[in-house]
Image (cartoon, rainbow, N blue to C red):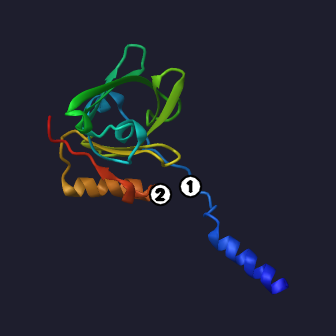
Amino acid sequence: MRRALLALLLLAGCAAPDQRARPALQTVPAVDLSRYAGTWYEIAHFPNSFQDGRGRRCTATTASYALLPDGQVAVTNRCLDAADGGREIVATATAYAVEGSGNARLRVTFFWPFYGDYWVIGLDPEYRWAVVGAPERNYLWILSRTPALPAGDYAAAVGAAAAQGFDVGRLQPTPQDGR
């Protein structure tokens, strides 16, 4: 009986999900928002309901950021919906930097009072590419100042995400043709 109980406990332990806590997500030390402002092209992302759900299939996705006089950041996301004949979809938001984060952690709202986390976890020193994720590691975007990212830069961006515990196998490339 004891052996059967021990075997059952061992099997249950093997079937249970890994409960080890991952280290907390780390951001880059600082983001110069004036350098970050402007348009970024989405190179790859984790599938999500607002880009890939409800019959939508976003391509040619961009995100534009502008500094506002009150210190907040205006956000304009655009994509072409390939599932709807290339119709442009535009979503606007505002964001603010979390105090003490060096501007690397932003809180973004498309619909007040709901906010989402936008954490810059990888950033090229020349601001040519950026990696943005959420602390739960359920959202991830690789962004570039140009519609295509050289292979070495893409590998560096993916490496930054993988080093933070993101399942980079989930990344989907974002087609940028059509712009």
149 to 99, vertically: above or below: below
Observer able to see residue 172: yes
Q: Position of residue 123 (x, y in %)?
A: 34, 45
On the rendered structure, is 179 left or right of 119? left
Q: Position of residue 174 (x, y in %)?
A: 26, 46
On the rendered structure, is 2 left or right of 90? right
Query: Which residue is rendered at x = 42% and y = 14% of the image?
Result: 70
Q: Amino acid at mark 1?
A: Pro
Depth check, front residue: 37 or 54: 54
Q: Are marks 2 and 1 in contact (CB under 8 Å)?
A: yes
Query: Callout 2: few (<14), some (14-19), or many (20+) C-alpha neighbours within 10 Å?
Result: some
Observer able to see residue 75: no
Numbered label attached to residue 23: 1
How many circles with numbers are drawn on the protein? 2
Quadrant in the picture for residue 163 = bottom left
In front of the other: label 2 or label 1? 2
Q: Position of residue 159 (x, y in %)?
A: 35, 58
36 to 19, vertically: above or below: above
> Of callouts 2 and 1, which one flags the residue occurring earlier in the amino acid sequence?
1
Numbered label attached to residue 165: 2
Query: Which residue is rendered at x = 65% and y = 66% of the image?
Result: 16
Query: Callout 1: few (<14), some (14-19), or many (20+) C-alpha neighbours within 10 Å?
Result: few
Depth check, front residue: 78 or 135: 78
Q: Position of residue 134 (x, y in %)?
A: 48, 43
Q: Amino acid at mark 2?
A: Gly
> What quarter of the picture does the C terminus occupy?
top left
